Image (cartoon, helix red, strand yellow):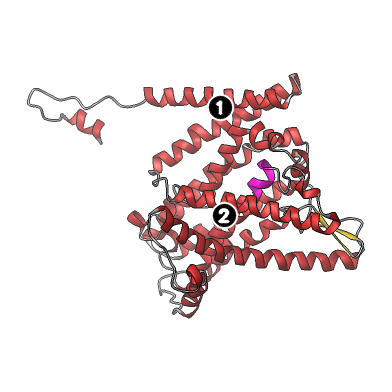
Amino acid sequence: MENLPLSVFILSSIGKILIIVHLLLIGVMAMIWSERRVSGWMQDRLGPNRVGFQGILQPVADGLKFLFKEDLIPNHVDKPLYVLAPAMLLVPALVTVAVVPFGSSITILGHEIPLQIADINIGILYILAITSLGVYGVVLGAWASNNKYSLLGGLRSSAQMISYELTLGLAIIGLLMLTSSLSLREIAKAQGAYPWHWNFLIHFPAFLAFTTAMFAETNRLPFDLAEAEQELVAGYHTEYSSMKFAMFFMAEYMNMIVGSAVVVTLFLGGWHFFGLETMGGPVWSGIISFGIFFVKTAIFLFVFIWVRWTLPRFRYDQLMNLGWKFLLPVALSSIVVTGALWISTGSRLVVGIGNVVAALIVVSIVARMLVMETPEPAIQDNDSRLTPTALDATE
C-alpha cells in the first residue's frame, strides 16, 4: 500500500470504502432475513415467506415500514442527546471495519491493491478503542429518554460492556505475544493456510473467552439484559420509534458482522484455507481470498443466530459471575501460561496443551469456590415453619 502512487491510493481507498459500507448495509438486511428464517427453521415453523421469494424482500419491507412511521419525540426527553444517541452507536460500528483485512490483495492495471481499507500497525488497539465508544450511545440514549426502564437498561449495558471488555482485551494478549504484531493483516498471515496452525487451536480457552465476551459486547442473547422485554419493556430504546429505533438494530447487526470478521481474522486464519487463496493468478486469487473470508464470517454469524435460539437469558448475577469469576481468570491464565511455555519451550503445541490444562484447572478451582460459598438450606423449627434466619437465607 505504501508503494502505490497517490492517485491510485486515493481512488482505491474510496472504492474500498464504498464497497465495504454497501456490503455492511446489505449484510444487515441479510442478517435480518437470516435471523427470522433460521429461527423459524429451529422452531419448526416457516418464518417470513410472503414478500419476495422465500421472504427475501422482507428486510426491504421492514425498512420501508420504519421509514414511513411517524418519528415521535416525547416531550420529556433531552432532545439533543436523544437524537444523537443512535448515531453514536451506529458510527463506531461503521468505522471499526476499516482495519479488518477481508482478503489478500488484487492486482489491477499493474497495481497490487490490498483488500483492506487501512493497514495500521496498531489495528487491534484501534478496534478495542472504537468498540468501547459504543457504550456511550446506549447510555446516552437511556439517560436522555428520561424513563426508568430505559435508564435501568442503560446501566445494565454499561456495567456489562465494561466487565466484558476486560476479557475481550486480555484474551488476545497471548495471541499477540506469539505473533509479535498488532496489525490484523500480519496476524492473519502468521497463521498460515492450514487449520492446525490457526490460533483457535493454540489459544482455545482464549478463543472461547473472546467469543463469549463478543456476544456480551453486542448485547445478544443470552446477554441481552439491557433490553430484556420481560423486565424492562424494551430497555434503553423504549422511547425510540421510526428510523431512530431502526438505527439501534442496524448498529447491533453491524457489530455482529464486524465482530465475526475480527474473530475470523484473529483466530480462524483470516482469508487462508488450504492454499486456495493463492490459486487463479493475481486477480482471481484476491477474489477467492475474499470469498473464503466471506464464508468464514457467514458461518460465524450463523453461530450468533444459533446461540440466540438455543440458550435462555442469564440472570444479571449469572452474567457478572461468568464475566468476572470465569472468563477473566481464564484470560489471565492464558497470558501467564503462553508467556511461560513459549519462552521455555518455543513450541506452539506445548502452548496449546498448556492453555487448555490451565483453563480447566482455573475453572475447576473457581467452580469449587462458588460451591463452597453456596448458602446452607433453610432451617426449620419444630412447627415446620421458616424461622426469620431461614427466611433471610431463602431470600
- CA–CA distance in space, label 1 to label 2: 26 Å
Q: Residue furthest left?
A: 383
Residue holding disc 1 = 359
Q: Quadrant of the N terminus?
A: bottom right
The image quarter in which residue 266 lies: top right
What's under tag 1, amino acid-wise?
A: Ala
Q: Is residue 385 above or below residue 110?
A: above
Callout 2 environment at 10 Å: few (<14), some (14 to 19), or many (20+)?
Answer: many
The image position of residue 243, as x and y in percent, is 50, 73
The image quarter in which residue 374 lies: top left
What residue range appears in magenta? Answer: 262-268
Residue 123: within the magenta?
no
Q: Earlier in the sequence, mark 1 or mark 2?
A: 2
The image position of residue 192, as x and y in percent, is 76, 39
What's under tag 2, amino acid-wise?
A: Met
Apparent side of residue 89 relative to residue 105 in the rendered image (left or right)? left
Residue 264: within the magenta?
yes
The image position of residue 165, as x and y in percent, is 57, 44
Residue holding disc 2 = 256
Q: Kindly tell me whether residue 244 is visible in this rendering.
A: no
